[in-house]
Image (cartoon, rainbow, N blue to C red):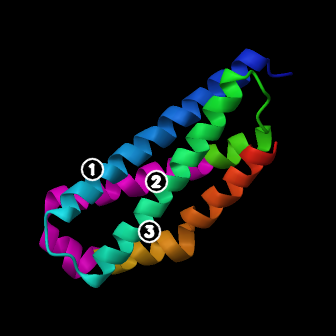
């Protein structure tokens, strides 16, 4: 069954909202972390997440410019962005939960594995940059 242009636009808008939600949660986490003395790994997490938010903004800009101009967006990028956004939202909510739970727990038990997961396993920054190239060149 063929997907209509309106259905695709709605799918892109759904992913757009989810991506914006992830960026908002990350901003809240960064704001909470800025109120404390940061460990080296918290600084690395902050720097990484600021870069991720910048790439989220580029993706949102590309999506909404294309939707405003009624231009097609690449459907393979939609599925990849949906998958990455779901993971990013989960990781952002997990970080937010830990920050709300106990900052000492964050420092002692959480931050090292979390940064390793972000940078080496999930590789959000690299994947979002690739997706942005797809969105800009489509």
Q: Which residue is mark 2?
A: 53
What is the magenta range?
83-110
- Circle 3 — which element? helix
Quadrant in the rendering for residue 29? bottom left
Measured as percent of width and height from the top left, residue 74 is found at 79, 39
Quadrant in the rendering for residue 94? bottom left
Q: CA distance from mark 2 to mark 1?
A: 12 Å
Q: CA distance from mark 3 to mark 2?
A: 9 Å
**Residue pictured at 27% horizontal, 50% vertical:** 28
Measured as percent of width and height from the top left, residue 63 is found at 64, 35
In the rendered view, would you say 74 is above or below 38? above
Of mark 3 and mark 1, the one earlier in the sequence is 1
Quadrant in the rendering for residue 102? bottom left
Mark 1 nearby-residue class (10 Å; few <14, some 14–19, many ≥20): some
- Circle 1 — which element? helix
**Residue pictured at 66% horizontal, 22% vertical:** 68
Q: CA distance from mark 3 to mark 1?
A: 15 Å
Mark 3 nearby-residue class (10 Å; few <14, some 14–19, many ≥20): some
């Amino acid at each position: 069954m063929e997907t209509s242009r309106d259905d695709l636009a709605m799918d892109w808008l759904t992913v757009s909202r989810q991506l914006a939600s992830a960026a908002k949660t990350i901003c809240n986490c960064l704001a909470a972390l800025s109120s404390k003395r940061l460990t080296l790994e918290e600084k690395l997490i902050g720097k990484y997440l600021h870069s991720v938010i910048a790439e989220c903004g580029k993706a949102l800009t590309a999506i909404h410019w294309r939707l405003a101009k009624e231009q097609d967006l690449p459907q393979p990028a939609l599925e990849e962005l949906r998958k990455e956004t779901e993971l990013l939202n989960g990781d952002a909510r997990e970080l937010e939960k830990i920050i709300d739970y106990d900052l000492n727990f964050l420092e002692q038990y959480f931050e090292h594995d979390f940064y390793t997961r972000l940078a080496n396993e999930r590789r959000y920054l690299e994947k979002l940059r690739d997706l942005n190239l797809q969105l800009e060149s489509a």
